[in-house]
Image: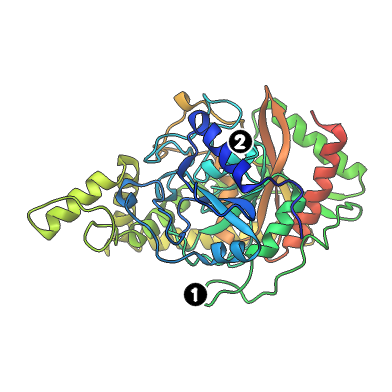
Amino acid sequence: MAFEQTISVQESLRRIHELQPELNAAVTIVDDAPEAGIPVILKDNISTKGIRTTASSRILDNYVPVYDATIVTKLKHAGFTPVVKASMDELGMGGTNRNAATGPVHNAWDQDRIAGGSSGGSAVLTARAAAPLAIGTDTGDSVRKPASYNGVVGVKPTYGRISRYGIIPYASSLDHVGYFTTSVKDAAAALEILAGRDDHDMTSSLEPVGEYEACLNPNLAGKKIAVFDTVADALRDEAIAAAFQKLVSDLESAGADVTHVTMPEQLMDLIAPVYKTIANSEAAANHSNLDGIRFGVRKPGESVEDVMTASRTAGFSSYVRARFVIGSYSLFEENQDRLFRKAQKIRRLICEAYASLFRNVDAVICPAAPTVAPLLAESSDVRFGQDEFVEEHMQLANFSGYPSMVIPLGKKDGLPFAVEIAAKPFEEQTMFDVAAGMEALLKEGRHE
């Protein structure tokens, strides 16, 4: 198993330092990292023994874990060396990477645009060749959206495929470990390293880990690929729509059996409110320990309650505090039936409809993000208004736990956009095969 693109640890560190003034992607650079090994970038919510891990939140500014996350142990055993803890939206809550305690991360190809979040630091450093592999987490497209905006491969495997032990959580029923590479081949190799059962994480799966790289087959002939028309037809960007339709035509020319599937827009319109209700509720419960007493940077106060209030007020951005308020409100006993439990029931209906798309097909594809990366000045962290499903549709793979990945599809005015490929649970091999076939078509220069 070998990555197609790699550099030395020292060269990686040099590039990270060089890029920091432009991208603001690093929280902690591991300058004393061992020189041996392949450099790997870690999102700053991944526990690293002896290396500060803040989740880009002021309240965790002094947190240095005493243990490695399971995936860090796996990476080290495979010959990887962590070189940087990359910036993220605070505690994973956001889609812009603007609310990190260290300030916004800038897009890899335009400093005036967002990186996407919450794994923006990992995405932009991968795009600028600082390391061949970067780890992120994906709760509601937090790997795949930044991958689309920065022109790299982003993978979110099946729920339970990769252990989450040692990952600072956001929303436990939606959180996945994901990662970034610059090729599908490297993405397949990375999953072999990261995947597998871990008794420290009882949600991790007993499903055997495949030889994804060795078995990679880019032949598209006979592959049954469904186009998710509900998303594709909602695109308003003509350049992205044209590139996607050209890809669909090329898939047919390559021998793929292309069909078309839809979901009721009534359910699609409920993706965002259901996600916000469940994610914010689980986040409020998961982070109740960040109070300055049991955990986190402590601020002074005359009583325990004063210390907790002062610590949480100073420790969290207003955006994250607002999410905690919404989540806590949904968990109040008098509200649980009409909010949290109702959201869970609707999630089940959405998942059933999503599962129906995969009947008799190998993969479902659609445009990843509806636009290129938005301008920093025009984007907002406060996304509590009405959301369009064309923007939030990749959350379907978090609701369902199905594997999903994005690969670069093209560029508009020099800015990348991507296609999403999803498959049935634990059929990552099929997903990689379809992605590799698409990647080969794109490398032939059929899309500009």
Which amino acid type corresponds to the residue marked 1 in the rendered image? His
Q: Residue furthest left?
A: 302
How far across and how far down the image is residue 440, in percent? Answer: 85, 43
Q: Nearer the viewer, residue 67 or 444?
A: 67
Residue receiving disc 2: 149
Residue 224 to residue 197: above or below = above
Q: Quadrant of the N terminus?
A: bottom right
How far across and how far down the image is residue 8, in percent? Answer: 66, 47
Q: Which residue does the image show at 91% across and 45% down from the upper left?
A: 254
Q: Which residue does the image show at 53% across and 41% down from the upper left?
A: 120
Residue receiving disc 1: 200
Residue 236 in view of the camera: yes
Which amino acid type corresponds to the residue marked 2 in the rendered image? Tyr
How far across and how far down the image is residue 160, in percent? Answer: 58, 67
Q: Are marks 2 and 1 in contact (CB under 8 Å)?
A: no
Mark 1, other Cα within 10 Å: few <14 / some 14–19 / many ≥20: few
Residue 314 lies left or right of residue 251; in this view the side is left
Q: Which of the two discs, 2 and 1, sits closer to the camera?
A: 1
